[in-house]
Image (spheres, rainbow, N blue to C red):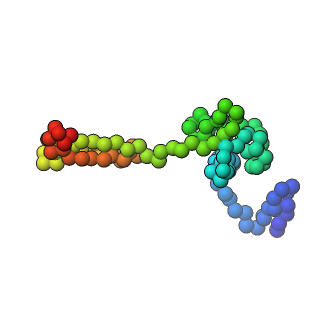
Amino acid sequence: MRFWTRFTRIDTLAPKRLYLIPVLSKALDILELLQNEKGPLALESIYQKTSISKTTVYRILKTFVHRGYLAQSQDGLYRLVARPKKARFGFGSQSADMPFSEAVTDSLKAAASAAGVDLIVLDNRYDGATA
């Protein structure tokens, strides 16, 4: 049995549940729009192109600016901000020949991995010039 609501068809025989978060979908629509545009967009333009309520667009944009995903220029235009995917740090290991130094290096590698950080380890072989 099928019937239509004002906007969508509802199929009562085989309803499919989509476990979606509506405001998250709207936020992603806005990010995708800004990714596909050639330049920055104004609130009004984003509102018209997405058909999302203007107050919701405004709040999503302000959240993205606050979290560092978007930047707003002096003239009110919004643009994506290039964000590094991962932090990267270097560590000058004392020596791979010493068990204590290896334990320290292994511990740092594990902590960096758990934190989502790229760790570059170089062995300086206890040489000050190399370090």
Q: Nearer the viewer, residue 35 or 112?
A: 35
What residue is drawn where x is 69% and y is 38%? Answer: 77
Q: How many marks?
A: 0
State the image coordinates of residue 66 (x, y, percent, origin top left).
59, 34
What residue is drawn where x is 31% and y is 43%? Answer: 90
State the image coordinates of residue 24 (x, y, percent, origin top left).
65, 47
Residue 49 shown left or right of residue 127 in the figure: right
State the image coordinates of residue 2 (x, y, percent, origin top left).
83, 66
Q: Nearer the viewer, residue 128 or 89?
A: 128
State the image coordinates of residue 74 (x, y, percent, origin top left).
67, 31
Q: In this picture, is 118 found above or below 15?
A: above
Question: Which quadrant, please, contains the C terminus?
Answer: top left
Q: In this picture, is 32 found above or below 71?
A: below
Residue 101 seen in render: no
Question: Which quadrant, please, contains the N terminus?
Answer: bottom right
Quarter of the image for residue 23 reads top right
Q: Nearer the viewer, residue 81 or 57?
A: 81
Residue 125 shown left or right of residue 2 in the figure: left
Quarter of the image for residue 56 reads top right
What residue is drawn where x is 63% and y is 42%? Answer: 79
